[in-house]
Image: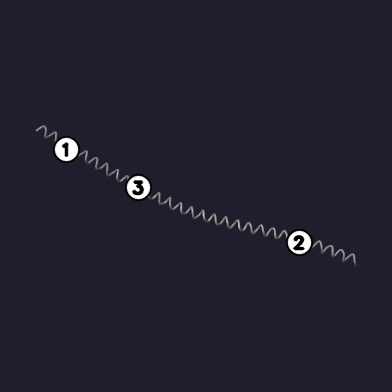
């Protein structure tokens, strides 16, 4: 009977050590999970910030593209107007030159 009690106490001590080791492992795993959860939250925050920065950059790019297109349109219009005015004044100058020639010939 004493031997059985001794074996049971030995088994109890072994189970207590195993329980203690498992509790330590559980705490380590919980700590690791907590750290990973914090890291995941930080990464998620960084990701959202980058998404926001990307959206802002896209909007700025769209505005710049629209402004550039507007400037190109205005430039093309101004070049067309300048060409039309040049042609008109060249025609007027040729007409005046011919008129002067006609006046000189008379």
Q: Which residue is mark 3?
A: 71
Going by the picture, which residue comes out furthest to the left?
106
Kindly identify the residue that appears in the image at 21 percent across and 40 percent down. Answer: 89
Residue 59 placed where, x, y %?
Answer: 43, 53
Instruction: Work out how far the residue at label 3 is from the one at label 2, CA to CA, in angstroms.
Output: 76 Å
Q: Quadrant of residue 38?
A: bottom right
Helix, strand or loop under label 1: helix
Q: Earlier in the sequence, mark 3 or mark 2?
A: 2
Q: Is residue 24 left or right of residue 2?
A: left
Q: Earlier in the sequence, mark 3 or mark 1?
A: 3
Q: Quadrant of residue 39?
A: bottom right
Q: Which residue is mark 1?
A: 96
Q: Are marks 3 and 2 in contact (CB under 8 Å)?
A: no
Mark 2 neighbour density, 10 Å: few (under 14) some (14–19) many (20 or more): few
Q: How is the image coloured?
A: one colour
Q: Which quarter shows the C terminus?
A: top left
Q: Which residue is mark 2?
A: 20
Going by the picture, which residue comes out furthest to the top?
105
Q: Nearer the viewer, mark 3 or mark 2?
A: 2
Q: Which quarter shows the N terminus?
A: bottom right
Q: Earlier in the sequence, mark 2 or mark 1?
A: 2
Residue 51 placed where, x, y %?
Answer: 50, 54
Kindly identify the residue that appears in the image at 52 percent across and 55 percent down. Answer: 49
Along the viewing direction, whichever of 55 and 28 lies nearer the viewer: 28
Going by the picture, which residue comes out furthest to the bottom?
1
Helix, strand or loop under label 2: helix
Along the viewing direction, whichever of 99 and 24 lies nearer the viewer: 24
User: As displayed, is residue 84 above or below residue 62?
Assistant: above
Q: Is residue 95 left or right of residue 39?
A: left
Residue 69 placed where, x, y %?
Answer: 37, 48
Instruction: Work out how far the residue at label 3 is from the one at label 1, CA to CA, in angstroms.
Output: 37 Å
Q: Is residue 106 left or right of residue 6?
A: left
């Amino acid at each position: 009977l004493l031997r059985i009690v001794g074996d049971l106490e030995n088994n109890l001590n072994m189970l207590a050590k195993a329980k203690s080791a498992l509790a330590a492992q559980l705490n380590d795993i919980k700590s690791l999970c907590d750290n990973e959860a914090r890291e995941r939250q930080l990464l998620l925050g960084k990701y959202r910030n980058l998404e926001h920065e990307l959206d802002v950059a896209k909007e700025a790019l769209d505005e710049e593209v629209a402004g550039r297109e507007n400037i190109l349109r205005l430039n093309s219009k101004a070049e067309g107007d300048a060409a039309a005015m040049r042609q008109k004044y060249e025609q007027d100058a040729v007409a005046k030159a011919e008129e002067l020639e006609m006046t000189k010939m008379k």
